[in-house]
Image (tube, helix red, strand yellow):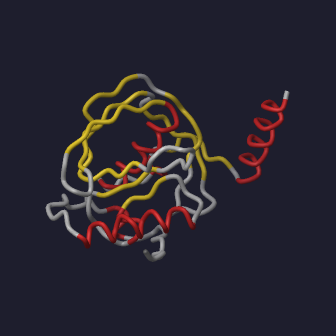
Amino acid sequence: MAIRTIVKHPSEVLETVCSPITTFDQNLGILLDDMHETMIEADGVGIAAPQVGTAVRAAIVDFREGQDRIEMLNPELVLYEGSDTDIEGCLSFPGVYGEVERYDRIKIKAQERDGSWYELEAEGYEARAILHEMDHLDGILFTSKITKFITQEELDEMIRAQEEEEEI
């Protein structure tokens, strides 16, 4: 495994509609492992292939809370409902945060690294992270969906307030 360079905005690859994955081989496994290692190193919860300079339909979400990482190859959104607005950031936009509205409950269909298909239901923060990464595969940047930008100071204050509330 290797840590790859995270592509920062502006970059053409970040706004490219990615190609479907048709070959499920060792090279794909290497890409997925490198993406995961890169995401962990950058303290992210998700990463998409274009963020490491490869315009293919591959993305990973991993909250590292005792659950397996979610590898999504050629993902498709099959069901969605509800909506929620919350703060997002992105590894390709260091220091940029904003409020984004997304579906609150989703169901996706995607392929595993061996090419087999699976379905996954998610809600809340997990659904948000999956949708954020799926947007990357269509060249859609979260900044195009921000309804209100949040400064680093505002974000830090919100985190502090939430931590204090959890202590009570």
Q: Which residue shows up at 20% across the image and 67% down it?
A: 25
Quarter of the figure with the C terminus: top right
Residue at 57% in and 40% down: 99
Residue 4 locus on image (x, y percent): 45, 75
Q: Quadrant of residue 34?
A: bottom left
**Left or right: residue 86 compared with residue 145:** right
Q: 29 or 39, which lies in front? A: 29
Q: Nearer the viewer, residue 126 or 158?
A: 126
- In the image, residue 16 sits, relative to residue 163, either above or below, namely below
Expressed as whole percent of the image width and height from the top left, the position of residue 102 reads 45, 34
- Residue at the spot 45% in from the left edge and 47% down from the top edge: 68
Camera-nearest residue between 77 and 120:
120
Closer to us: 30 or 124: 30
**Residue 131 falls in image quadrant:** top left
Q: Image quarter for residue 36? A: bottom left
Residue at 41% x, 27% y is 105
Residue projecting furthest to the front:
66
